[in-house]
């Protein structure tokens, strides 16, 4: 069974190779730490990883204080509107899954109350899967004028999760489609969108080849969970 150190080294090598193949140097690795215990994150931090991805507000709220200040955090999960205020109180650098105009408006409203200027990515549901959240590509452009009118939000790019596939190559067309959509929006709206969050443990090299600047890797670093994983205690997870 490989250690976390060995897994990290293997993932970093794969990231570097894919980036070199694509002639790129702008790829950052997010260690997807949801449901993994703080001890595993400390190990990863010791091995040089500093950027972690959490997808539950209550888990992040309990876990973040247990890590040293050099740890960095992205929120990568689906965000419920009633959790926005709690989320903005946490030190997340980037919010990946902004999947509707209604959610964006709520974040902007709460940010105005708290003085925050959240950096966000717009999630795009390229395959129109009913099980996933996100803007339909055809509806994203009509929503952009309203999104850009939200003065507290800093839109930095797009994010997607392709359909589950048996082979990484099957995801390539979705990654390429997100890159093309980003390029079209940049040109049409004169809007810089440097960030593309796409690719996970099974397919991140393909995502990098197609333009990913952020890859979200969990099991390839921390291993597969045999049970429900780490959960905050009732006290630490309570949202006032």
Image (cartoon, helix red, strand yellow):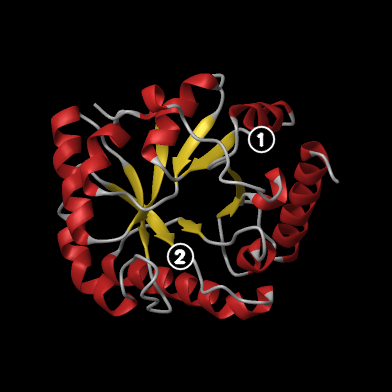
Disc marking residue 76: none
The residue nearer to you, when weighing 76 against 198, is 76
Residue 151, visible in the rendered structure: no
Please tell me which of labels 1 and 2 falls first in the chain.
Answer: 1
Residue 126, visible in the rendered structure: yes
Percent from the top left, x then y, of residue 23?
70, 62
Quarter of the figure that contains the C terminus: top left
**Residue closest to the far right:** 1
Q: Dots 1 and 2: beta carbons under 8 Å?
A: no
Crowd tier of the residue under label 2, counting other residues whose Cα lies within 10 Å: few below 14, some 14–19, many 20 or above: many
Give the Cα separation between the discs numbered 1 and 2. 23 Å
| Residue drawn 30% across the image and 40% down it | 118
Q: Is residue 176 left or right of residue 209?
A: left
Q: Secondary structure at mark 2?
A: loop
Q: Is residue 204 left or right of residue 191?
A: right
| Residue drawn 25% across the image and 75% down it | 139
Crowd tier of the residue under label 1, counting other residues whose Cα lies within 10 Å: few below 14, some 14–19, many 20 or above: some
The residue nearer to you, when weighing 42 against 195, is 42
Above or below for 100 versus 176: above
| Residue drawn 74% across the image and 31% down it | 47
Percent from the top left, x then y, of residue 112?
15, 35
Q: Secondary structure at mark 1?
A: loop
Above or below for 207 versus 77: below
Disc 1 marks which residue?
Answer: 49
């Amino acid at each position: 069974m490989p250690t976390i150190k060995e897994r990290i080294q293997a993932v970093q090598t794969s990231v570097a190779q894919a980036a070199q193949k694509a002639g790129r140097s702008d790829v950052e690795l997010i260690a997807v730490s949801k449901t993994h215990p703080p001890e595993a994150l400390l190990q990863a931090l010791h091995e040089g990883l500093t950027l972690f991805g959490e997808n539950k507000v209550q888990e992040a709220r309990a876990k973040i204080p247990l890590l040293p200040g050099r740890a960095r955090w992205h929120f990568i999960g689906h965000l419920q509107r009633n959790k926005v205020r709690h989320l903005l109180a946490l030190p997340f650098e980037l919010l990946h899954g902004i999947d509707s105009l209604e959610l964006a408006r709520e974040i902007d409203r709460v940010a105005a109350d708290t003085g925050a200027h959240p950096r966000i990515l717009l999630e795009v549901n390229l395959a129109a899967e009913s099980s996933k959240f996100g803007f339909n590509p055809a509806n994203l452009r009509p929503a952009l004028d309203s999104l850009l009118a939200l003065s507290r939000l800093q839109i930095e790019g797009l994010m997607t999760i392709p359909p589950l596939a048996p082979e990484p190559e099957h995801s390539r067309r979705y990654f390429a489609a997100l890159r093309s959509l980003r390029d079209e929006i940049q040109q049409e709206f004169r809007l810089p969108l440097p960030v593309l969050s796409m690719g996970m443990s099974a397919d991140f090299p393909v995502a990098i080849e197609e333009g990913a600047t952020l890859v979200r890797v969990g099991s390839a670093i921390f291993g597969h969970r045999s049970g429900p994983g780490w959960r905050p205690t009732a006290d630490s997870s309570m949202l006032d």
